[in-house]
Image: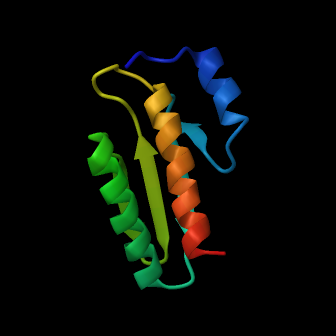
Amino acid sequence: MQKLSDIQIDELLKLIEGWKLANDKWLEKKYRFQDYLIGVEFVQKIANLSEELNHHPFISIDYKLVTIRLFSWRAKGITELDFELVKKYDEVYKELMP
């Protein structure tokens, strides 16, 4: 797993909706849900995906708002794996919030 350059990160961010670079460190997105339990279900599903890949995000649940932050500690930066996961997280969200 290799750290991406700032230019690579900027280019990949253009390809995904709603994700941003926060604090010059994290990939971050806030997901809004119609009710609390759907947000919790979303967190459970992405937690399972993350566990399968042994790559775990920071997750914050604030009632109907779930915030995800990703960073690769081993690479000391953002990697392609982070971008693979954000796409999967967005797919899970679309399944729950058609």
Seen in the image, is 61 located left or right of residue 15? left
The residue at the point 46 percent across, 27 percent down is 78
The residue at the point 43 percent across, 69 percent down is 42
Location of residue 45 by image quarter: bottom left
Seen in the image, is 72 located left or right of residue 39? left
The residue at the point 27 percent across, 49 percent down is 51
Which of 85/59 is in front?
A: 85
Asked whether residue 25 is in view, the answer is no
The residue at the point 42 percent across, 40 percent down is 70
Q: Compared with residue 47, is residue 64 higher up or lower down, i.e. above or below? A: below
Q: Compared with residue 8, is residue 71 higher up or lower down, i.e. above or below? A: below
Indicate how the structure is coloured in the image. Answer: rainbow
Which of 50/65 is in front?
A: 50
Q: Position of residue 29 (x, y in %)?
A: 55, 52
Q: Position of residue 67 (x, y in %)?
A: 46, 58
Q: Position of residue 30 (x, y in %)?
A: 54, 58
Seen in the image, is 85 located left or right of residue 72? right
Which of 84/63 is in front?
A: 84
State the quadrant of the C terminus.
Answer: bottom right
Q: Compared with residue 4, is residue 92 higher up or lower down, i.e. above or below? A: below
Q: Position of residue 14 (x, y in %)?
A: 73, 35
Which of 26/56 is in front?
A: 56
Location of residue 7 by image quarter: top right
